Amino acid sequence: MSIEILKFNEEVKFIIRGISPTIANTIRRAILTEVPILAVDYAVIIENTSVLYDEILVHRLSLIPLKTDLEDYVLPEKCECGGVGCNRCQVRLYLEVEAKDGPVLVQSSHLIPEDGKSFPVKDNIPIVKLEKGQKIVLEAYARLGLGKEKVKWQPVAACAYKYFPLVKVDEAKCSLCGECVENCPKKVLEIKDNKVIIKNSIECSLCRECEKVCPENAIRVEYDDTTFIFRFDNLGALPSDVIVLKALEAIENKAAELKSLLSKS
């Protein structure tokens, strides 16, 4: 197995070679559902005279990504307090905003964590607009959770993979009509030096539109079912490398648990 990194920032893209579709999907699911991050679980509403009901306000807070330090916090079920709530398994955040002189847009920047570290990933996420005289005071409690519980605990906005495309052009048959180049939605083909070349096969979506429009039947689109192109959009709670490593760690732990159970049967 080998890995080739293409992008590794907020947008992550990499190629894994030498695995099966089953393993590829296992990695995808682990990234989505097995990596713990912080998210608001509940809140104590002290005062809310905004247009939003308390429930909707808390729902919006819960979907704000929070910076997560996995060294400081543990999952509630693994905490010594038994998940009741302590400084090892939850963090308190404060929000107090009043529109005294005119309208005020309450944003994620108004959410202040007690630990001084678990700030919202972005400062400008809108929560609610207050009109003059309106006020919100609340305490929100965030805890670690997994994406398999609720989507608010997913560390990524999307995670997908596709087979590695293999685009082949039969130069003996190709008439250089340009139909494949013109109709390719991803623009991965071009005519250069009197032949059709593949500029960037990674961008191919495997739609086979080039095959359909080729009058000479000179182009074939296939794929390598042992090589996969992964991509996901990091929401910012954790560094991208930590997300991947934690997902692989979760897979390893589950495999070890299964092996242990089978050995006892």
Image (cartoon, rainbow, N blue to C red):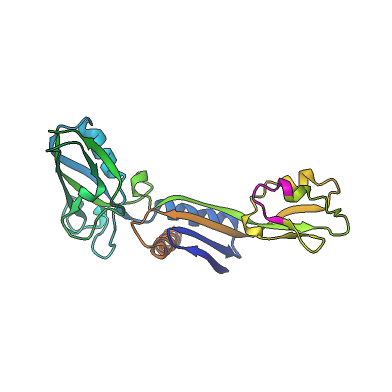
Q: In the rendered structure, does residue 108 fall within the stretch colored magenta?
A: no
Name the spot of residue 70 as percent of width and height, x first: 29, 62
Task: Count every numbered label the image shows and give the total.
Answer: 0
Q: Residue at x 80, y 64 (%)?
A: 193
Query: What secondary structure is the stretch in magenta mostly built from?
Result: loop
Viewer-closest of 245 and 199:
199
The image shows residue 248, relative to residue 180, as above or below, that is below
Name the spot of residue 104 as percent of width and height, x first: 20, 39
The furthest residue to the front: 101
Q: Residue at x 88, y 59 (%)?
A: 172
Would residue 146 appear left or right of 229 to someone viewing this image? left
Q: Residue at x 84, y 45 (%)?
A: 215
Would residue 160 appear left or right of 257 to someone viewing this image? right
The image shows residue 47, relative to residue 10, as above or below, that is above
Name the spot of residue 125 as percent of width and height, x first: 30, 46
Would residue 143 appear left or right of 199 to someone viewing this image? left
Q: Residue 54 sits in which quadrant?
A: top left
Viewer-closest of 144 and 67:
67
Q: Residue at x 67, y 50 (%)?
A: 206
Q: Quadrant of the C terminus?
A: bottom left
Q: Residue 60 sits in which quadrant?
A: top left
Viewer-closest of 217 and 106:
106
Task: Give the magenta range.
Answer: 182-189
The furthest residue to the right: 172
Q: Quadrant of the N terminus?
A: bottom right
Name the spot of residue 127 as percent of width and height, x first: 26, 40
The image shows residue 41, relative to residue 17, as above or below, that is above
Viewer-closest of 151 and 51:
51
